[in-house]
Amino acid sequence: MPSVCFYFQVHQPIRMRRFSIFEDNRGDPYKLYFNEKLNREVFEKVARKCYLPTNSIMLDLIHKFDGRFRISYSITGVFLDQCQEFNPKVLDSFEDLAKTGCVDFLDETYYHSLCSMFADKTEFKEQVALHTKALRSFFKCKPVVFRNTEALFTNEIAKLVEDMGYKGMVMEGFERILGWRSSNYLYSVKGCSSIKTFLRNYRLSDDVAYRFSARWWSEYPLTSEKYAAWLSRCEGPLVNIFMDYETFGEHQWEDTGIFEFLKKMPEEILKYENLDFKTPSELVALDPVGEIDVPTPLSWADIERDASAWLGNEMQRTCFRMLEGLEPMVRDAKDDKLIRIWRLLQNSDQLYYLCTKSWADGDVHKYFSPFDTPYDGFINFMNILQDLKNMLKNKVKLQEGKR
Amino acid sequence: MLGWEFPPFKSGGLGVHCYELTRAFASKGVEVDFYMPRTEFEMKGTTPKLIQVMPVYFGPYTAREAYGVDFMGRVMQYNMHCAEQVAKNHREKHYDLIHNHDWLTAKAGILAKQKIHRPHVMTVHSTEYDRSSLGPNQQILAIESEGVHAADRVITVSHMMKRQLTDKFGADCSRIRVVYNGVDPDKFKKKWDVKKYSKEKVVLFLGRMAEQKGPVQFLQAARKVLSVMKNVRFVMAGGGDMLPYLINYSIELGISDRVTFLGYIPESQLQDAYAKSDVYVLPSVSEPFGITALEAMSSGTPIILSKTSGVSEITTHCLKVDFWDVDKMAEYIIALLRYRVLNHTMGKYEVEDARRFSWGKAADETLKVYEELV
């Protein structure tokens, strides 16, 4: 009997500002590098359209089904920061959900970063620790399942995560890795001893996340009844439905009927005797049925499901290598403000904006980007990185002078 | 087809357009007689068949106000002769359609239509508003307006141009079709195949030295760039009325040792000019299309385009600026010179992108316009 395992990714990047090398670039670098006005506007808009209404629906559903409707979230640290800065009501509503006991949380990097790909893993461990601390203080929980930024996964990262004490990790249930096998089971990972993977059932997930309002889709319109029927026909012990939380009200606008769909769904699903809801923490006890091997990066983005959305072209790799190369200087500078800026720049979205893939996926990149072109994005990113590097250099020099 | 210039006798996009379009037509089995002013050389056995009507002694942009030359009179005479020739040749050729380019041959198009009763298509490559800096010539405006209203179909080289015709001339939007210019991508040497002998970085401007082309903004951006970077050369290729002024202006800005004025460069040097440059800037205040941008793209040279250019409607792999935003222009130039990976990535994608704009496609779209009428 399959358990339906819902996990929602909650994240908003802190976007960069258009930074000019000709303006007076002294002063608070945070204000110079990041577009506070835009970040506030986007956050407020999405809070109004998605976070607040969806959280309220989730809370009602949890109360209505008295513990039988269960969900899980992964919320980035930068999102929690923005809650506190821009709209504490959003944070309150997540805390209310946490208090029900029917909501599970996953751990990830605080800054939604790709630092798991750095050669030196210190930064990765620190960012995860920061996230764990934030979850403990806001939601009083200690996650046992990990989700890496954009579900980025390799055997090596899984081993690292296992060594940090996690029992499970999220990944994309993609044929390239699975072959004939089903995503509706837990698997162990090559080279690891105990960690188990939760594989996203991307068809059933994307039926809601991408195709819900697609008129070209033969199954349009998707109803809760139909969706529940599909779930009930699944084999295996669990079905992992993972998606961006912004699906509700932001990617799929209210007038598509997404909220009505959500409100009716638990009831329709629970009509089937073979279906129930469980969270990753509950399901991680299941036995793995086989081993998966992921030698090269796998993610949940674009049609390639690799790291090419962030590291696909030379411009992206240049920025990434520069970010990585700054680490020793950032640490030497011993300035909390600069460390935070460096980490905010690690946000994978900053690299996503530089993507030049021009087929269908390119449209998605364009939709989310604050820049006209990837070239524009690269220039801005590099100018900021150069500026940060100069600042760090001066700082380190100054400290050496003092000594 | 009624034209004015034709390679190798040309001074702008109009000549390139006529040449490439008629060549593409020939390969599609469309027969074209191309009427143009008489030149010093008799050209025979060419495709299309060139019919040289009478000498005019000057180009559309040069020597317009020259002493002793009755420019307008000469143009009108040419138009009348043209129309007569068309009528005469029609008796045995039985033309299906008359197609004229710009105001220079608009009258001939109108007159020929009256004589042989065949549909008339007019392509507008630019208007007097785009060409004149001090104020448009009213006579020319009147001819342009007459042509645009009389023609059965008007083809413009961009949507920007189309808007201009509806806004300024009150043209009927339903009769206007947009056909973008093209480029022959394989004609141009690739940047990475050309050896450069100097370590100096090169930023190129290529166009007529006239206010609308934005040479002043180019020099202002150059000064900004030079305030933070050394070892950059700004090359300005092209002739025009403003040349003396611009030379003085570069001295005034204190950057004359970093700016090279090449004057008009012949076709044979064009390829090297693009391929040996690190950045191509099209800073036009007003540019109906801007074929040079496609040519630079085909060479793999990164381009910075003013948003007030027709070509910027269709290119994606480029950087776009407002022509007055000299700071941003300078910033883009610096970035393209400093960040090799940016320069290379853009260049690589541009070469691909340029393939979308072939003359074959332009010819097909022009034929579609013909088919609406015959």
Image: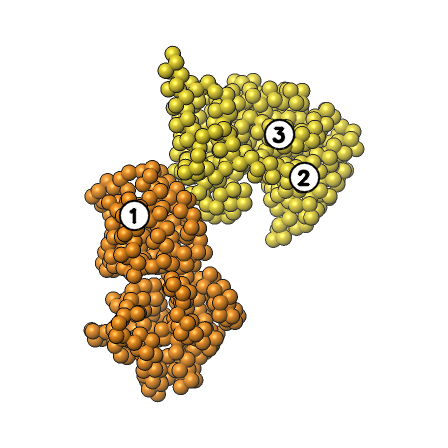
> Residue placed at 25% from the left, 77% from the top?
B55
Q: Sequence-wise, which precedes: disc 2 or disc 3? A: 2
Whether labels 1 and 2 share one chain: no
Residue B154: mark? none
- Same-chain check, marks 2 and 3: yes
What residue is shown at x 32% (from left), y 72% (from top)?
Answer: B4
Q: CA distance from mark 1 to mark 3?
A: 51 Å
Q: Which residue is rendered at x = 56% and y = 21% of the image? A: A130
Q: Disc 3 marks which amino acid?
A: Glu
On what subunit does the disc labeled 1 rest? B
Q: Secondary structure at mark 3?
A: helix
Toward which corner of the image does residue B311 lie, by quadrant? bottom left
User: Label 1 vs label 2: CA separation?
Assistant: 56 Å
Which residue carries the number 2 mark? A48
Of the residues shown, which amino acid type is indicated by label 1? Glu
Disc 1 to disc 3: CB gap under 8 Å: no
Q: Name the residue nearer the viewer: B189 or B107.
A: B107
Q: Disc 1 designates what residue? A: B252
Residue A65 at what x, y percent from top left? 78, 32
The chain holding disc 2 is: A
Name the residue tied to disc 3.
A85
Q: Colour of chain A?
A: yellow
Residue pushed farthest top? Answer: A403
Residue B110 x/y as whole percent: 41, 80
Q: Is residue A265 above or below residue B27?
A: above
Q: Quadrant of the N terminus of chain A?
A: top right
- Count of numbered circles on the image: 3
